[in-house]
Amino acid sequence: MQILVVDNNVELCQVLQQFLTAHEEFKVVGMAHDGEQALTEIQRLEPDLILLDITMPYLDGLGVLEALNSMHLKKKPKVFVITAFGSDRLLSRLLALGADYFLVKPFRLEILVERLREFSSVSSPVIVEEAAAVKENEPTIDQKVSEILHKMGVPPHFKGFAYLRDAVLMYLKEGYYAGGLTKEMYPALAKKYRTTMSGVEAGIRNALAAAWENGNTEFIKKLCEPYCEDRMPTNSLVIARIVEGSLCL
């Protein structure tokens, strides 16, 4: 089985490539770190299967699935979604767009291999959730998100601190949607805090600017690599990366 790994986490892609190629039935033929690059590689490599993440810059996983439905490919690949979000709403949408199989992060690599083997023998989509064991006294997700914001140097007295924290928690609860920042998240935050969508956006931007100029710039660059070098990252990229970081802490 020829596999294309698509995930904005470069290190994870390398780990997956190394682990999967150790099994003779799998061959990782390529990697992509954003949705636009993924579409190019799909056309070039014609893989049998795509390991597809949802949260990516430029074009997210939902956008990739939508594009696949309109592409005239000689061989349409199967799509195995690996996502940090397990909401019924998101999974229903992925299913409607043609995803074939789901595995919810975090998961063990051995489980991924088992599911890939099972996948080759099933004809209908299967939703699999592999929850990590909860450790005693483990920090809450709210605490994890706040810890990342503090490490970034986001001033806690800025309105944008609360907006960012709640935005990440909303993503973790509801899932990631293309265009969801302005269509769903900003309106919800504006209603909660009795402000406007532009006020929410500006609040987040001001908080990030303060962290970028006077906080831990190197931590922010590392959090958002490889898409952040000398320019302050976008609101959506920061939110997506904090989501990933809070799940890994």
Image (cartoon, rainbow, N blue to C red):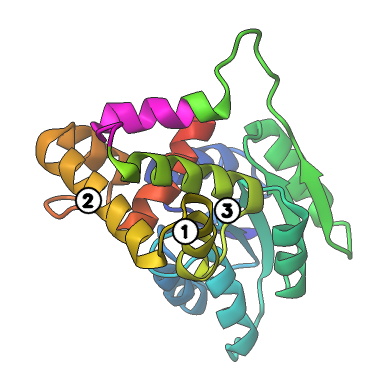
The image quadrant where one finds the N terminus is bottom right
Q: Is residue 99 visible?
A: no
Which stretch did the figure color magenta? 144-157
Q: Which residue is mark 1?
A: 190
Q: Quadrant of residue 72?
A: bottom right
Q: Check disc 1 and report its element: helix, strand or loop.
A: helix
- Residue highlighted by disc 3: 27
Residue 247 picture location, percent across and down: 53, 33
Give the residue type that dot 2 points to. Answer: Asn
Report the Cα–Cα distance between label 1 and label 3. 47 Å
Determine crowd level at label 2: few under 14, some 14-19, many 20+ residues with C-alpha closer than 10 A: some
Calculate the distance from the C-alpha at mark 3 to the C-alpha at mark 2.
45 Å
Q: Which residue is mark 2?
A: 206
Q: Determine the main secondary structure of the stretch shown in magenta.
A: helix
The amino acid on which the numbered mark 3 sits, given as a three-letter code, is: Lys
Residue type at mark 1 is Ala
Between residue 19 and residue 238, name the one nearer to us.
238
Q: Earlier in the sequence, mark 1 or mark 2?
A: 1
User: Which of the pair 140/204 is nearer the observer?
Assistant: 204
Residue at the spot 35% in from the left edge and 39% down from the top edge: 161
Residue 57 visible: yes
Disc 3, SS: strand
Q: Quadrant of residue 147?
A: top left
What's the distance in space between the residues labelled 1 and 2, CA to CA? 16 Å
Q: Residue at x 55, y 55 (%)?
A: 53
Q: Nearer the viewer, residue 34 or 109?
A: 34
